[in-house]
Structures are given as structure tokens and as C-alpha cells.
Amino acid sequence: MNLNIICAEVEKIARSVGAFLKSEQAKLRNTDIELKGTRNFVTYIDTEAEKMLVENLRGLIPGATFLTEEGTVSYAEGKYTWIIDPLDGTTNYVHGDTPYSVSIALMKDKQAVLGVVYDPVADELFSAAEKGKATLNGNPIKVSSHNTLTNGYIGFGIPYSLDARGEKILQNAIEQFRHCSFRIKGSAAAEICYVACGRSDAYFHSGLSPWDVAAGTFILECAGGKNTDFSGGNGYIFSKELVASNGAIHKDIVEQIVNY
Ligand code: 2AM
Ligand code: CA
């Protein structure tokens, strides 16, 4: 199986689903739907986008299984599994804001071998296949070389349910506020890719699901970065804890912010 050829097809699929999201967001902005209605509308968009993804990806690798955010197909174990989030950054999306993204990863024997993340508003397509080069719109990308928290440009997210540990992590981050610039942008998949292209130095978040991180972390790895859970272990796709970095600043994030 040639994963580079498959990746080119996945990129086309991500672009077309991204275009669908973008045009539906414009409709959402033009209608004065109350919050409950807005949620329903977004649920409709999520589900439609996921169906489009599943339908198109199914043809690429016959027999591959799916793990998806919206659960429009039930998960089964298999040699190849697509892990997909049709709309990452839902809260931004509902508010007419950006970024939001389509996130598609392919796992082979539980290891990521392909990742595509597409932001249709910025028209940024991040991708990597088979430990090859990571790219942004076809151009090679690599991580930054910044190696201290001082003057670091660091993305993070706050879990919807903030527990005591999450509060402590925020406190730790606050202690760094004089030295670092922190950013909360609201699409984990996109923000991990910002580390991959050197735009930011690191990203951390707890409470994430496999479809939020599987594609971005693979792209980051191919761009020379590093991913771990909050203890420095490598179960980050399924463990709901992620530190994604350029590698150089990783130890400092783990020791001084997330692993209290
Ligand atoms: P979503 O938009 O698909 O819900 C926001 O911080 C980012 O984290 C988004 O990518 C959001 O994905 C994701 N996320 C997933 N689970 C989350 C959780 N429990 N708490 C906060 N953010 C979560
Ligand atoms: Ca998500």
C-alpha cells in the first residue's frame, strides 16, 4: 500500500469537507438561531461532515475501521483504523470564529502512519505520511528551536470539566505569565500543527480525545517535534493528556507546568 498516494486522496477529501464546513458556517452566521437551535444545527453539520468523510475514506482502504467523534459508524478493531474529527473547534465554529479544522489520522497496528489537518478559513492543510516530511500546503515544515520557557509562545486548552489537577496546572502556568506568551485558540488539532510548523513552541491540554490529537501529533512527530502525556509517557493518543512541543522546550513544560 502506497501511503503517499493515499495521503494525496485524504488531502482532497479534507479540503472538500472543509469547504462544506466553511459554507455552512456562513449560513449559521446569517441566521439568528437561538443557542439550542444553534447546537442542533451544529450537530447536523458535524454529522453530515462525518458521513462525508466516512463515505470517502471507506473507498481508500477496504476493510479499514473507524473511530470517530460523532459515532456515525461503530468502532471495531482492525489492522487499519481511521481516527477522525469532522469539526474540531466546535465552540469557535458556533461563534462564527476561527480556527476550526477537519482532522484525519490513519493508524496501522495502533501506530499512526498518516495525518491530515485542514483549516478551511485560513486554507491551511497540514499533512504527513509514513514518517516522511510534514508539510503545510505542500511545503516542508519543521518545529522551532526555542528552548526555554522564557519568551516561549505556548498554546494550551482548558478541559470542559476543570478538576483540581487542572486548576493546579493553570496556577503553574500563571507563574510563568511574566516570561511566556500563552494562547488559547480552541482547535486542538490545528494548535498541535502550529507547533509542527514552528509558529508556536509547545501546546498542552488535558481531557482530549483520540480524534483531537491523532493526526496533529503524527504531523508534529514528522516535523521533528515531541509528544508525551503529562508524565512524559507515550500513551498520549488515548490517555487524554498531551504535551506537544518542539522537543527543546518539552522537559520544561512537563516539569514546570503539567506534572505538578
Ligand atoms: P471539539 O471542538 O471537537 O470539542 C478546545 O480546547 C479544544 O479541545 C477543541 O479542539 C475541542 O474539540 C477539544 N476538546 C475535546 N474534549 C475537550 C474537553 N473535555 N475539554 C475541553 N476541550 C476539549
Ligand atoms: Ca475535537
Image: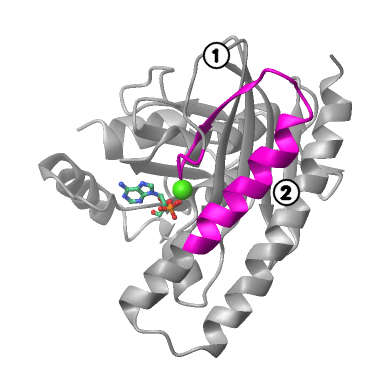
Locate the C terminus and report the quarter of the image it occupies: top left
The vertical placement of 73 against 80, above or below, is below
220 over 51 or under it: above or below: above
Up-down: is 93 above or below 78? below
- Give the residue pinned by disc 1: 110
* Residue type at tag 1: Lys
Instruction: Say which label, 2 or 1, has the lower sequence index.
Output: 2
Q: Look at 44% across and 17% down and name the residue there.
A: 234
What amino acid is at disc 2?
Ala
Across and down, in percent, residue 203 comes to 46, 44
| Residue 82 visible (yes or no) | yes
Query: Could you say which disc has been placed on residue 14 in the image?
Result: 2
Q: Residue at x 60, y 81 (%)?
A: 27
Determine which quarter of the picture holds residue 81: top right
x, y (%) of residue 129? 76, 26
Q: Secondary structure at mark 2?
A: helix
Count of labels shown? 2
What residue is shown at x 38% (from left), y 17% (from top)?
A: 233
Q: Position of residue 21 (x, y in %)?
A: 63, 64
Front-lying residue, 254 or 165: 165
For this rendering, which residue is in front, 2 or 172? Answer: 2
Quarter occupied by residue 101: bottom right
Location of residue 106 (image quadrant): top right
Q: Is residue 230 magenta?
A: no
Range of magenta residues: 44-72
